Amino acid sequence: MKLARPDIRHPRIVLAGSQSGDDAGLVAALRTRGHHARWLAWDDPATLDADVVILRTVTDYVGRLDEFLAWTRRVPKLLNAPDAVAWNAGRHYLRDLRDAGVPTRDRRPAASVARTALVFLGGIESHAFSTDAESPVEADFELWDLGQAGLQAAAGQLGIGVEELLYARVDAIGGPGDAEVMELNVVAPSLGWRQLDDTARDDGQRQFALCVESALNRLGLGPLSHRGP
């Protein structure tokens, strides 16, 4: 475990969401890396005092979308960034992906169809799980390529590099040769940690913490950016 050094000002990190949800282990993963982190509801006024807010398990923003989007621009630094959240909050983003050449499905199938959820951390593939069986799956390279194409198109639309998306989830349906993106979520998707075994979950959440470190450095908020007196 990396210990916080008293001569360095460590950024105050808030995870916006519920600590009892799928992301329960993220604070521990961040603290293991020496970061100060805690959970708050997204509409808690204390989020405005944080140095960085990371959106997680936020499920009530849809009915309060205008309020939520205004809040994303009031917090000092948000991951993912406010522009990405605003672009992704409406279904029109699928049209942008389709216009970029990404095969998409903009209508839900008549019957219930299992989707493969592809999780990316810092633009790199992390793990996949089935939304039907709620268990990890081994996604083939064609599905990962489709997910990466969706991620690249999203980043291009936003004028950023894929590494600037701390997390992203791409839900795909279909098989080899006919797979399509049904949903891309960079707002606050479930990342499926509970579907992984203990080792895979620990590895994935450690990678999440490393990607947070990269984001802090990119934002000028890395531990060595703010030395104490």
Image (spheres, rainbow, N blue to C red):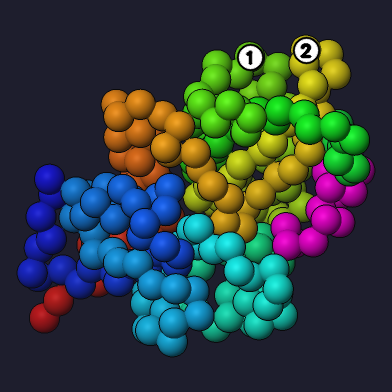
Residue behind mark 2: 176
Q: Is residue 50 above or below residue 82?
A: below
Q: Residues within 10 Å of mark 2 (few under 14, many from 20)?
A: few
Q: Residue at x 61, y 58 (%)?
A: 187
Q: Is residue 100 magenta?
A: yes
Q: Residue at x 9, y 70 (%)?
A: 7
Give the CA separation, mark 2 to mark 1. Answer: 8 Å
Asked whether residue 166 is in view, the answer is yes
Across and down, in percent, residue 86 comes to 71, 67
Q: Do the residues under discs 2 and 1 have CB atoms within 8 angstroms?
A: yes
Asked whether residue 152 is in view, the answer is no
Across and down, in percent, residue 140 comes to 63, 14
Residue nearer the viewer, 146 or 106: 106
Q: Residue at x 12, y 45 (%)?
A: 1
The quarter of the displayed image where residue 65 is located: bottom right
Q: Left or right: where does residue 222 sit relative to residue 163? A: left
Q: Left or right: where does residue 103 sit relative to residue 52? A: right
Q: Amino acid at mark 1?
A: Asp
Residue behind mark 1: 140
Q: Left or right: where does residue 96 sit relative to residue 136? A: right
Across and down, in percent, residue 15 comes to 40, 64
Under circle 2, the secondary element is loop
Which quadrant would the C terminus be assigned to in this image?
bottom left
The quarter of the displayed image where residue 54 is located: bottom left
Under circle 1, the secondary element is loop
Q: Residues within 10 Å of mark 1 (few under 14, many from 20)?
A: few
Residue nearer the viewer, 70 or 175: 175
Across and down, in percent, residue 94 comes to 84, 47
How many labels sit on residues? 2
Q: Which residues are magenta?
A: 87-102
